[in-house]
Amino acid sequence: MAIHMSELRKVQRTPTGTFFVCLPRAWAEQYGLKKGSVVAINETANGKLLIDTKYNVEPSPLTANLKPGPYLGREIIGKYLLGFDIIRVESKERISFEVRDAVKRTVSRLVGLEIIEEDYAKIVLQCLLEPSSFPPEKILRRGYAIVSSMHRDVVNSFTDGDVQLAKSVIARDDESNRLYFLLVRILRTIIQNPGLSDKLGVSPIECLDYRLAASLVEAIGDECARVAMKTVELKETKLAEDLKKLFVDFHMLCFEAHENALAAFFVGDITLAENVRNMREKIDRAFSNIEKVARAQSLDVVPQILAVASFLRQIYEHSVDIADLVMPKR
């Protein structure tokens, strides 16, 4: 019978001074331990001891079996995020070209996932990542670097009517999503593997904060992509100089907000995080100024202009949410 809850056991001591604690009998029998068995004992950063009965055995890869269907791409992403190492897509009949194409498009969205075997009725995918090589902070920083460049470029493309630059921003959103999926996979793997948590120096509660921060960074990227789509809709329309200046000023405020929010998150700077929240009055004023000037423009472009302003304002709201995650570092 497995041990599902904590058991309290007294620490004992031999006459020679050695401390010891008896292992639960049910647990020992479940894992085949007997007199003379060897287990590995590792100390974590927070002082806990981990007892590993299979320390010298390679863990078996997690395998998932899927069948072709209308939601196959979504199912593959789900298994990837859950940490499955091998994903087998099998059918009793020949797998169609459409299904194969859907699988390949899904694979292209997921870092480290490769097609290692394929025949008329089977496609086998394998994740070739080594989790310990991907510290969460490094992935989040890389994802944020992409999103911040999207923000800079999308405002320039919008104010100058640069459709090609806007399309470049939309393309970069896919890379932002790839890194987000990677980070979620790594975080889930860390939570299920105390040894990896200790090796990377990331506690389970920190994994939760990283997950929330990453989702907000990814959401900022989505807002940038929405601005880019509106820019494409406007078909190279250039803004009037007064409106252009207002948008540039608004952009600088919103950019400063998420830049400071992420900086505060990484170092645990409460003061910097609070500064992000205190920017709201400036943000509201800048947004109101854009609304007033925008309504004086041609009726054809007013909806797009107001939509873009709303997307940028939402970036600020996401920045506040990131700032709310900031806790002092010990």
Image (cartoon, rainbow, N blue to C red):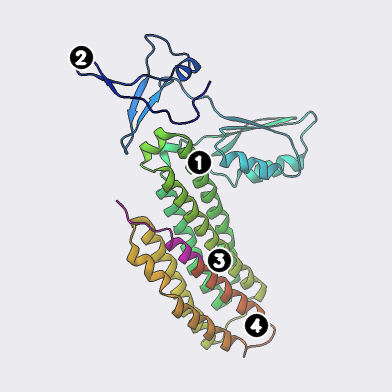
Q: Is residue 256 visible?
A: no
> Which is more foreground, mark 4 or mark 1?
1
The tag on residue 302 is 4
Residue that sits furthest to the bottom in the current view: 296
How far, Cα to Cα, is label 4 from label 2?
85 Å
> N-terminal of the two: label 1 or label 2?
2
Q: Position of residue 318 (x, y in %)?
A: 50, 64
- Residues 223 and 322: in front is 322
Q: Is residue 302 visible?
A: yes
> N-terminal of the two: label 2 or label 3?
2
How far, Cα to Cα, is label 3 from label 1?
27 Å
The tag on residue 224 is 3
How far, Cα to Cα, is label 1 from label 2?
44 Å
Look at mark 2 in the image and give the residue it sits on: 15
For the residue labelled by badge 1, is the local secondary structure a helix, a strand or a loop? helix
Magenta part of the chain: 318-330
Check whether the beta carbons of the residues at disc 3 and disc 1 lie within 8 A of each other.
Answer: no
